[in-house]
Image (tube, rainbow, N blue to C red):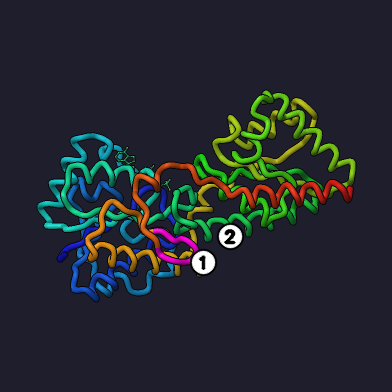
Amino acid sequence: IKHIGILTSGGDAPGMNAAIRAIVIAAHHYKIAVFGFYAGFNGLIDDESVLLSDKAVAHIIHKGGTILKSARCPTMKTSLGIAQATSTLMKEKIDGLIVIGGDGSFTGLLALQKQWSGQVIGIPGTIDNDIDGSDFSIGFSTAINTAIEAIDKIRDTAEAFERIFIVELMGRNSGHITYNVGIACAAEQIISFENFATKNQTASEQEKLLALAKEIKLAQANRHASYIIVLAENLWQGGATALAQQLQTLANIDCTACILGHIQRGGSPVAKDRILATKLGVGAVQAMIAGKSNIMIAEQNNAVAHVALQTAIMHQQGVSNNLVQAQENILALTAQRL
Ligand code: ATP
């Protein structure tokens, strides 16, 4: 192997830069040149890349975002896009491609691999943590810390004004961020896919609202000063704003909706993400040298593991039952004390 290509794709995640740095340093150790393609798969399609030097990756480990830029690239979903990407990889004599991104990016990598004979390796880089086969994805730890800090601040104002807040959190179609943040902030309610969508599958939207309103009223009767509901995005139609309006209309409950949004994607990566990214970046280069392809470099029980890309995108590994159960236990114990 002489030339590796790398790119960052999909939603940016804190720690992507740390992964780029680790790949470049490891590759240079093995006398391999690294080409960084810009803006996700767009860089492959438009043949826009930079030869990454040690200097280019110095002092980027603490920076959020990605020095290679990230983007969605709809063209990659077409056969023309795949053909253009393949042509660039051949023209630039790239032997293997490492993509840091989420499940969509891995799907792109799988499509590319069908047309291109080089090695393809994925590194899980998404705040959503919705990648199967890795205990964590790069960016998740920072994102939940950012959300926790924000909600701690919301708690202060909620206490002062004795208010109910509905805080909508990111996660696409997974509840990892919402569940972990909800537990860490001692949210009074976690509304996520694991408990809300599945628990009362037969219940109508109206019945779910009534049950929620009942719990809020009970807390108010017991003089809770503040009440925080964390809500997973894409779970409730219309999100936090709609839910707040519906609670008002249905039960005369006054809630403030707050959508944390992109604040969750930015910021300097926490130690856990920097270390994870470094381990996975070095692991990816070593796997490439060992001739591996079609795999994601993952972390399992603190060790680097190889997982088939196909497995990584299956969406079968949700929030662990232990976590869901822990929250149920806390709620039950709190209810007993009321
Ligand atoms: P995140 O979930 O954190 O935003 P992601 O990698 O899942 O990350 P997506 O927007 O789903 O983000 O995908 C990123 C890019 O991957 C897309 O813009 C596209 O270029 C490529 N991609 C996604 N799905 C496919 C597909 N079916 N075929 C080819 N390329 C794809």
Q: Principal SS element in the magenta part? A: strand
**Magenta stretch in the rendered image:** 298-304
Quarter where residue 285 is shown: bottom left
Cα separation, mark 2 vs mark 1, equals 8 Å
Q: What residue type is labelled 1?
A: Val
Q: Mark 1 points at which residue?
A: 270
Near mark 2 (Cα within 10 A), the count class, few <14, some 14-19 or many ≥20, is: some
- Quarter placement of the N terminus: bottom left
Q: In this view, does 93 lie above or below 309?
A: below
Q: In this view, does 151 lie above or below 287?
A: above
Residue projecting furthest to the left: 91
**Secondary element at image label 1:** loop
* Image coords of residue 38 (percent x, y): 27, 54
Contact (Cβ within 8 Å) of mark 2 with mark 1: yes
Q: Is residue 65 magenta?
A: no
Q: In this view, does 237 lie above or below 290?
A: above
Q: Which residue is drawn at 50% across and 67% down?
A: 272
Q: How many labels does the image show?
A: 2
**Secondary element at image label 2:** helix
The residue closer to the viewer here, 71 or 234, is 234
N-terminal-most mark, 2 or 1:
2
| Residue 30 visible in image | yes
* Image coords of residue 20 (percent x, y): 33, 64
- Residue 145's disc number: 2
In the image, taking residue 179 as reference, residue 333 lies left or right, namely: right
* Image coords of residue 33 (percent x, y): 19, 67
Q: Is residue 26 above or below residue 191?
A: below
Q: What residue type is labelled 2?
A: Asn
| Residue 71 visible in image | no
Quadrant for ligand 1 reads: top left
Q: Which residue is drawn at 31% across and 58% down?
A: 68
Q: Residue at x 41, y 58 (%)?
A: 298
